[in-house]
Image (spheres, helix red, strand yellow):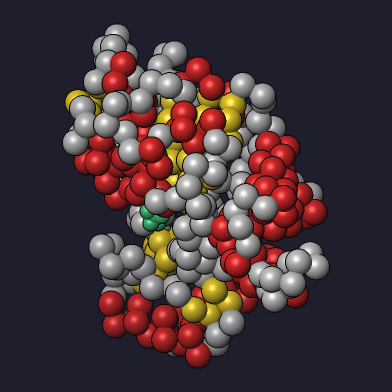
Amino acid sequence: IINFSPGPSKLPEDVLLQVQRELLDYHGTGISVMEMSHRSPEFMKIVTDAQENIRQLLNIPSDYTILFMAGGGTGQFAAVPLNLLPSTGKAVYLNTGTWSAKAAKEASKYGCVIEIKPDFKSSSNEIQWDHDEDVSYFYYCSNETVHGIELNFIPDTHGIPLVADMSSNILTKDFDITKFALVFAGAQKNIGPAGVTLVIIRNDLLGKQSVHCPSVLNYSVMAKENSLHNTPPCFNLYVMALVFQWISEQGGVKVMEQRSNAKSQMVYEVIDHSSGFYSCPVPASVRSRVNIPFRIQNGNEDLEKQFVDEAKRRNMIQLKGHRSVGGIRASLYNAVTVDEVSLLTAFMKDFMKSKLQ
Ligand code: PLP
């Protein structure tokens, strides 16, 4: 089976095999990680190893704290304003699609949200907004999973703390963490099973939370207690640690980035050389490398259904587009291999040929 799911998505086979080997007896303890105290030395080691690994993978300096939280990306839509808004009560949100819009809506419960919409058709990377306004942070989503929009630049926020939701493209691309005040990512695309969320926060932003911030969403509480304020999603955290290890063994984030570029280029090439049989609705400058939405004959739903059904018969699954946009979507996260993408592109060509005969 080749799994092109947008999330929860494919995990590296080596990681799953290791989970299988250790499932009933983790490192000679005679029990599984799911049955182990989160305060045991074995589990604490999983947490510290994961922190060290991600610090190395993303080159995170010591003035940033790494947190593993529960509540998914959606939990962070609330945690970010609850922790960071109080200083001014205002924040800027760049609305690029479903996920940034949801984040803005959640934040507006806690303060004033200034929403801006970029014009991706313009050639400039400059995002227009009144940056003299006193705001607590500037928020954006680096990859909109539903629409397949990925920003290939880091917005210039004129010194305002930058917050990014990197749920769907973290660890697929090297980036400079020092440009960010806070980055978060739900695990279920490139990091591990759903249920654990990676948060990387610059230390000077700790301690600014609202008095109403629940403890489990409070970055200062989580930082003080090394992400073990309450029982964490232990099993998910363990698998996440194995994925970090796997990425290191593969050669790190730069290798993931090369693969990601190669895989996405293969699919876009077929789309762009299909004389309009396939089309991608996203402007070329912001096409995602990890979620590729496309239509067949400008949205012929009958053909699109045939495509998804035929792909399934060839063991390629979860290619249906998001229900809000329709069409097809191929998600090419880190665990999807170049060979698997070759099979998809070969199928795309075959399918087109069979319909044009
Ligand atoms: N942000 C992005 C970019 C996503 O793709 C998703 C979910 O797919 C979320 C946030 C929400 O994550 P969760 O379902 O873990 O709350």
Point 50% across, 17% down: residue: 204
Q: Quadrant of residue 67?
A: top right
Left/right placement of residue 84 relative to residue 227 reads left
Residue 354 visible here: no
Q: Quadrant of residue 320?
A: bottom left
Left/right placement of residue 252 relative to residue 330 reads right
Where is residue 321 shown, x and y percent of the image? 36, 68
In the image, is residue 60 above or below residue 307?
above
Where is residue 341 shown, x and y percent of the image? 61, 69
Point 40% across, 42% down: residue: 216
| Foreground pick, 285 / 196 | 196
Where is residue 45 shown, x and y percent of the image? 72, 48
In the image, is residue 324 above or below residue 75?
below
Q: Residue furthest bottom?
A: 313
| Foreground pick, 151 / 228 | 228
Where is residue 128 shown, x and y percent of the image? 31, 22
Left/right placement of residue 350 relative to residue 320 reads right
| Foreground pick, 295 / 237 | 237
Point 60% across, 67% down: residue: 35
Q: Look at the image and tell me in which quarter the N terminus lies.
A: bottom right
Point 35% across, 78% down: residue: 304
In the image, is residue 248 above or below residue 279?
above
